[in-house]
Amino acid sequence: MDEFPVKGMDAVVFAVGNAKQAAHYYSTAFGMRRVAYRGPETGFPDEAVHVLESGSARFVLRGPVRAGTDLGRHVAEHGDGVVDLSIEVPDVEGAYRHALARGARGLEEPHVLEDEHGKVTVASIATYGETRHSLVDRANYHGPYLPGFVAAEPLVAPPARRCFQAIDHCVGNVERMDEWADFYHRVMGFTDMAEFIGDDIATEYSALMSKVVADGTRKVKFPLNEPAESRRKSQIEEYLEFYGGPGVQHIALATNDILASVDAMAAAGLEFLDTPASYYEDPDLRERIGSVRVPVEELQKRGILVDRDEDGYLLQIFTQPVQDRPTVFFELIERHGSLGFGKGNFKALFEAIEREQARRGNL
């Protein structure tokens, strides 16, 4: 019996310095559609909150309206970043009590929010850093997001087709990976989906270790990274320094057409990591990946990486950090059977990240 059943990701909640501008950015560059709003105009004087969606992917952007709030303190200390990986569950009370019995720290007791659109039950528990997991049951709710929010028009005309339709996985950078993997095993009943150590995940200069924990249905997947001993500052150490502690490093977004998504998002100004020509010229690449749905030349034009495992293949690409601090970034991923995370691309990816670190003077 699954003691902590989950339905999937409910939302990724961001703390940002300016929610109105962030909402415009994600609408324009990510092709998302604003669907709900809460703020001073609706009776909530301390913060403005915009809710954006693309398929089942939901971003909630919270910005402080006045000084002296805890949200404002968080943004000042950490910059823009993820404060809540909300999970939809069928039984909030049961999940919350199970989590606390297994050692989780409760942040918000289960309670019911209600308006004319129905009821939502919500609770929350703490995880690494200042990140939390809200537990949400919205089975009896038909409003735009949560009670207290009003429906809102899109900020820009939505694109003809979505750039992505779901959240694939959410990656956390932590200082004690095994401890947090054990947290998910113990508290949520998640199991290990993959582990990457040693040469799997190292370059000439830096290294890290990673474990992927996931629920039994694999709808919610949380890779966890920690720095490993290396010659220079790893990307995880850079993140921990600039974010001011553990937090969410990147969000992977599932797309059915990564070429069209990259073209649209790049045209809107989103910056992706560069992949050197040598990656595509490596004779081992074509042998390793076999036949994929698009010519390698088309992948090379856009800097898209490709990897294959025993279940199939995947196409992936990573953005530059999307705020001034070198912290949160995004991944686009198109899966064709593969359940992996692009292990064959780690070296190329990390070298690309290191080139950007060097440009920032942080390697």
Image (spheres, rainbow, N blue to C red):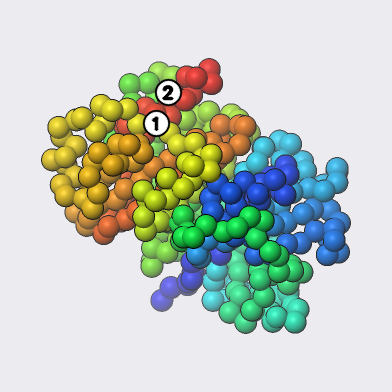
| Residue at which label 2 appears | 355
- Classify residue 271 as left or right of residue 286: right
- Classify residue 290 as left or right of residue 151: left
| Quarter of the image where the N terminus is located | bottom left
**Vertical placement of residue 117 versus 239, above or below:** below
The amino acid at mark 2 is: Arg
Question: Along the line of sight, which residue is nearer the eye, 33 or 11?
Answer: 33
Mark 1 and mark 2: Cα distance apart in space = 9 Å
Q: Nearer the viewer, mark 1 or mark 2?
A: 1
The count of marks equals 2
**Vertical placement of residue 74 versus 120, above or below:** above
Q: Residue at x 64, y 79 (%)?
A: 141
Q: Residue at x 42, y 45 (%)?
A: 263
Give residue 176's position: percent from left, percent from top. Answer: 49, 40
Q: Residues within 10 Å of mark 1 (few under 14, many from 20)?
A: many
The amino acid at mark 1 is: Asp
Q: Is residue 291 visible?
A: yes
Q: Residues within 10 Å of mark 2 (few under 14, many from 20)?
A: some
- Say what secondary structure mark 2 lies in: helix
Q: Are marks 1 and 2 in contact (CB under 8 Å)?
A: yes
- Classify residue 139 as left or right of residue 264: right
**Vertical placement of residue 89 versus 254, above or below:** below
Give residue 148's position: percent from left, percent from top. Answer: 77, 69
The circle drawn on residue 274 is 1
Question: Along the line of sight, which residue is nearer the eye, 129 or 312?
Answer: 312
Give residue 117's position: percent from left, percent from top. Answer: 70, 80
Question: Of callouts 1 and 2, which one flags the residue occurring earlier in the amino acid sequence?
Answer: 1
**Among the 4 quarters of the image, the one containing residue 101:** bottom right
- Classify residue 313 as left or right of residue 286: right
Q: Residue at x 58, y 79 (%)?
A: 139
